[in-house]
Image: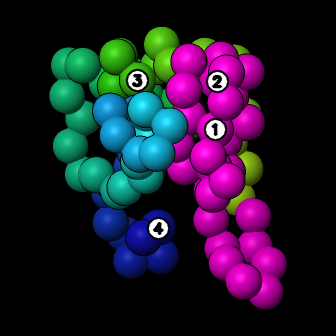
């Protein structure tokens, strides 16, 4: 997106659902709302809404790439349990 000069953000949000109660959602977004916090790391611009940030405090996000998949993984210290695929969790 940077090479194509597209002004966008990587959005991380937490919604209800998944097999454990809450699930992580990853998307790109072109608009910032009053409800968003903006974080920058290196050249990445990340949006997290103010409700989701409460579930993500202290979390570490990592990008994993192996033979089977490429995905973002969140190590969330607030999660009491999580599903096997790592995209949903419970508090």
- Residue 67 screen position, x and y as percent: 78, 86
In front of the other: 64 or 77: 77
* Residue 46 makes an appearance in the image: no
Residue topped by disc 4: 2
Which stretch did the figure color magenta? 64-91
Query: Do the residues bearing badges 2 and 4 touch, measured as CB atoms within 8 Å?
Result: no
Residue topped by disc 1: 82
Residue topped by disc 2: 79
Query: Do the residues bearing badges 1 and 2 touch, measured as CB atoms within 8 Å?
Result: yes
The answer to whether residue 68 is magenta is yes
Q: Is residue 64 left or right of residue 28?
A: right
Residue topped by disc 3: 52
As drawn, which residue projects farthest toward the right? 66
Crowding at dot 1, Cα within 10 Å, few <14 / some 14-19 / many 20+, comes out as some
> Vertical placement of 39 versus 55: above or below?
below
- Residue 21 screen position, x and y as percent: 43, 32
Q: CA distance from mark 4 to mark 1?
A: 33 Å
Q: CA distance from mark 2 to mark 3?
A: 13 Å
- Residue 55 screen position, x and y as percent: 51, 19
Q: Nearer the viewer, mark 3 or mark 1?
A: 1
**Location of the N terminus (image quadrant):** bottom left
The answer to whether residue 11 is magenta is no
Quadrant in the rendering for residue 72: bottom right
> Vertical placement of 55 versus 8: above or below?
above
Residue occupying image coordinates x 73% and y 36%: 75
Quadrant in the rendering for residue 65: bottom right
**Location of the C terminus (image quadrant):** top right
């Amino acid at each position: 997106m940077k090479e194509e000069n597209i002004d966008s953000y990587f959005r991380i949000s937490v919604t209800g659902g998944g097999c454990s109660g809450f699930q992580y959602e990853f998307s790109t977004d072109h608009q910032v709302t009053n409800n968003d916090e903006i974080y920058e790391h290196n050249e990445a611009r990340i949006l997290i809404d103010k409700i989701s940030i409460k579930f993500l405090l202290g979390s570490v996000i990592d990008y994993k790439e192996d033979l089977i998949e490429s995905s973002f993984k969140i190590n969330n210290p607030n999660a009491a349990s999580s599903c096997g695929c790592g995209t949903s969790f419970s508090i």
